[in-house]
Image (spheres, rainbow, N blue to C red):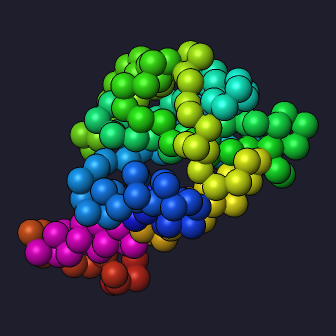
Amino acid sequence: PDSPNLRMLAATVNERQRQAYLAPYVAGQTISAIGISEPGAGADPAGMITRAVRDGEDWVINGRKIWISRAEEADFTILMAVTDKEKGARGGMSAFLVDKGTPGFNVLRKIPMIGGQATYEVALEDCRVEGWKLLGEEGHGFAPMQLRLGTRRIEMASWSIGMAQRALDMICEYAPQRKTFGLPLSER
Ligand SMILES: Cc1cc2nc3c(=O)[nH]c(=O)nc-3n(C[C@H](O)[C@H](O)[C@H](O)COP(=O)(O)OP(=O)(O)OC[C@H]3O[C@@H](n4cnc5c(N)ncnc54)[C@H](O)[C@@H]3O)c2cc1C
């Protein structure tokens, strides 16, 4: 499984969600996605405006998400939304488990990225989510989301260092005349 999502789920699931979502995820039977970024809220997720409003036992979500990896293929998406506009990131943001194929969870387009990756843009249009699929405490989704982001940042740092190291090794291996890289300019 994707370790950041796994970490967020492990920190938040209740017993019902553990059985329905976490157990099959840990067993490698399902794929997950995370929906945080929005057209107007990337580096600063506190600026997100996607709204989740209670309707009886359910939640109804409206908004727009962008750059969402695996949005089309994921069995479920952990979707972040504002549940209290006044409180925002400090007690007004919640996480929801949205299943693949839920009416109103509309994947709009695939966005090609550098390196052959792809992400997706998703519109939430009166997307109805059952009440028990609120992940963690209402209004307190921001901290577990940050826990998730921290896990990914550590991964990204090690991937980046590894790739940079491999690139340098390849230069030395395939173009030995460029081994002068590590030397002071005067000695090249
Ligand atoms: C391959 C890939 C996969 C992704 N997958 C997902 C995913 O699955 N789910 C998801 O939710 N998101 C995903 N994202 C989105 C990613 O998390 C965002 O790209 C990231 O949060 C940055 O947002 P942005 O691209 O809109 O950049 P911006 O927010 O526009 O930032 C651009 C630059 O401006 C700087 N900046 C922004 N605001 C400020 C400020 N107030 N002060 C100073 N500097 C600032 C930033 O540090 C950055 O250098 C993915 C992105 C990529 C590239």
Left or right, residue 79 beside residue 25: right
Q: Residue furthest left?
A: 174
Res. 175 in view: yes
In this picture, is 149 found above or below 92?
Answer: below
Q: Which residues are magenta?
A: 158-173
Residue at 43% x, 25% y is 102
Residue at 49% x, 55% y is 16
Left or right, residue 7 beside residue 183: right
Residue at 45% x, 18% y is 103
Residue 79: give x, y in percent of width and height: 55, 40
Left or right, residue 72 beside residue 7: left
Q: Nearer the viewer, residue 181 or 166?
A: 166
Residue 127: give x, y in percent of width and height: 55, 22
The rendered magenta stretch, by its main secondary structure, is classed as helix
Residue 168: in magenta span: yes
Q: Nearer the viewer, residue 179 or 170?
A: 170
Say which quadrant the C terminus sits in.
bottom left
Residue at 36% x, 25% y is 101
Left or right, residue 145 beside residue 7: right
In this picture, is 65 found above or below 150?
Answer: above
Residue 185: in magenta span: no
Res. 111 in view: no
In this picture, is 187 found above or below 170?
Answer: below
Q: Nearer the viewer, residue 98 or 160?
A: 98
In this picture, is 136 found above or below 158?
Answer: above
